[in-house]
Each structure stands twice: as structure tokens, then as C-alpha cells.
Amino acid sequence: MGEDVRLRAVVTLARAMASAHTPRETWRAAALGARDALGGAFAALSAWQRDLGRLKVLVNAGERAPGEEEFPEDESYPVHRFPEITESLHERWAGGGEPHAWVQSAEWPAAARPHPRAAALRRRGRGSCVVAPIVLHGRAWGELYVARPLGAPVFDRADAAFATVLAAVVAAGIAQTERLEEVRKLAFTDPLTGLANRRAVDARLDEAVDRWRADGSVASLVVCDLNGLKRVNDTHGHAVGDRLLERFGSLLSCCGAMLPGALAARLGGDEFCLVASGPGADEVLAAADELCARAAELELGDGVACGVASTGDPIGPVTSARRLFRLADAAQYRAKAARSPKPVVAGRDGAVVRLADAPTPAAARDRRRFRDAPPP
């Protein structure tokens, strides 16, 4: 393969990884780009799980053998079975050097015990592979693996040298994706509690309502107001108040786990919520009941006012997230006014459904948020 061809292959790989928007797209672009650049038939990208001492396969791309999934959930290999990996995957390289790729053939002397990777090649109908360690921020991140089928030319030293270059390009693409993921995480995460923030709630609630309208999956919202936070801040200081918020956030996350796929979030100040798509209204109410009971036991706190709105209850037409949010908010307002130790549920109390259209302070804030949204 000429230098110009390989240079174009490197540029193509870099562009493909730069255009990826998710980690999976990045992994797939890396594997396919390396496969094409090296003239292989199959490629895989694996990450080193330091705590487990294993290489976890992230993607299998190209001509997969039977049983190989494109994005496997549990395919991993202990690194101690591969001495060359163990030698390469140490924490840092003295003097700034990086490990080089190496080639493995399926051919093995009959009298010798086959190398595990050679045995794996034969088992999957492959004749050779080139393996390039991936280094990110000066540390081993994982490996890039490209294979050719039996009967195809075996990879040589020049291929290994080129694979080392490709691994560096892949590392740069992975670093970019990780930075983007970190930015996305910060944009949708509450910095104090680590829960989702209001922006994440808006997006998830819109998705839940759209899904309900499309296939009838129940969309539910639990809105909570942590009682007594101002008193705690005034009496004990904001640091103690922050700890109370963090503890309640942990309770919310724990109770939210009762609802598969639910999003636990802090809306701001002392306001929190759970967004669920799929679980029935009674399941959501059970989680809200558990949350109220646990919140009542929080030291220094004064319980929580909790309102629930679910399309699984008779709450009338819900054509937008705004309507569901206002119903849950109105139920929460009623729970707070009544000092209710249990959730108040829209649709199980007709007054709550009517209260959703009343000018409560929370409803006024919600109207400002949705002033450009279509009417319910």
C-alpha cells in the first residue's frame, strides 16, 4: 500500500471519527476506518478495565464470526492470558514513548502450545491480525484489533507500524468524544446533587409525552418540594442545607430506581422531580409513597410535599409536556398547602385537575417557561 493511499486512509479515519456524535458511533467509525485502512475484513475496539484486569470489547465491525455481536454487552478477556498486552498495558511510558503494534498469525508450530490469540484466529476463520495498543492522556486505554481471513496475505511489520499510527488517530478521536460527553454531562447535570437538571427534565418529559401519544406508554411526573430547607439554611447555614439537598437527592435516586428508566432530577432550589415512561400509575404512586416516607425520616428536614400526575390516571387530554407538568405541580402545591404526608395525585382528586389551571406561583413560573409552547 503506497504512502499516498495510507495518508488518505488516515484522513478518512479522522474525518469519520470527528463526525461521530455518540460513543458508539465513535467506536464503530474507529473500527471500520482501521479495517479499511489496513485492508482487513474485521476490526474490533476494546477498552481496558483496570479494576477487573480485562479487555472489554466495545464494538465488532466488518465480517463477524458466529456469536460475535456488533456492540456486545459482556464480551471481555483477561489480560493475563496475553503476555504482550500485560507488558503494554501499564500506567505510563517513561520518556513519553508509546507501545508499538504487533502481528499475530494463526499459524503455530505443531509441537508448540498455540498462543491464545492464534487459537482464537483459527476458531473464527481468520489468518492473521494486527493489534495496536491505544494510549490516551499518557495511559493505556485499550486496543485496536484488525484481522484478515484465512488465505489472505499475513500482516507484516509495515502494517504493524501503520497500525500504530492509526491507533494514535483513534486515541485523538476518542479523546474528542470524551470531552464532548463531559460537556453534555455538565449541561444536563445538577452540580450539587449529581442528579439531572431542568434541561434534562424538559427533554425527557417531552420524549415521555410523545411516546405516550405514539404507543400509549404511560407518562408520569412526580414533583417534590423539600420542606424546611429555608429554616435549615437560616438556622444551621447553607452548607448544612446543601447536605440536606444531597441526602434528599440520594433518596430520590433510590426511590426512582423502583421505576425502570426513570429520571431523577433537581429542578432548582428545593424542587425535585421524577420522570417515568412506561411504568403504570400505581407503580409511580408506590415509588412516591416510599419517597415521602423516607423523606420524613431525614435529619433536620421536614418531609416533602409531593404531587403526581400520570397519563395512566383520568387527567383529561395531555397534548404536551406543559399540561402534565402543570398537573403535577398543582398536585404538589395542594400537598404542601395541606401538609400532606403522602403524595397528592392528579385525577384521583378532581380538584387537583382544576387546580392545575389556577394561578399558583409554581404554575406562573411554568407558564413563563412554556410561553412559546402550543396550548394543551
Image (tube, rainbow, N blue to C red):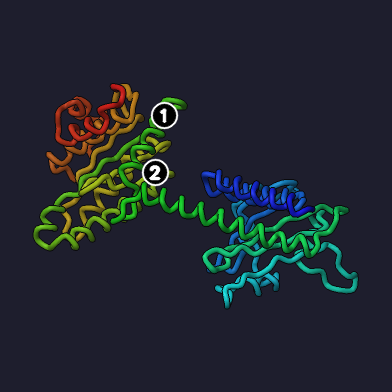
Look at mark 2 in the image and give the residue it sits on.
262
| Place of residue 51 in the rendered image (x, y in percent of width and height, measured from the top left) | 53, 68
Q: Residue at x 16, y 42 (%)?
A: 340
Task: Give above or below for 273 relative to 140.
Answer: above
Q: Quadrant of residue 87?
A: bottom right
Asked whether 87 or 112 is in front, the reply is 87
Determine if residue 48 is in view: no
Instruction: Report the disc number at residue 96.
Output: none
Say which element carries label 2.
loop
Amino acid on which disc 2 is placed: Ala
Q: Quadrant of residue 300?
A: bottom left
Look at mark 1 in the image and give the residue it sits on.
210
| Place of residue 313 in the rendered image (x, y in percent of width and height, measured from the top left) | 32, 29
Task: Give above or below for 309 relative to 286.
Answer: above
Q: Earlier in the sequence, mark 1 or mark 2?
A: 1
Task: Give above or below for 162 relative to 276.
Answer: below
Amino acid on which disc 1 is placed: Asp
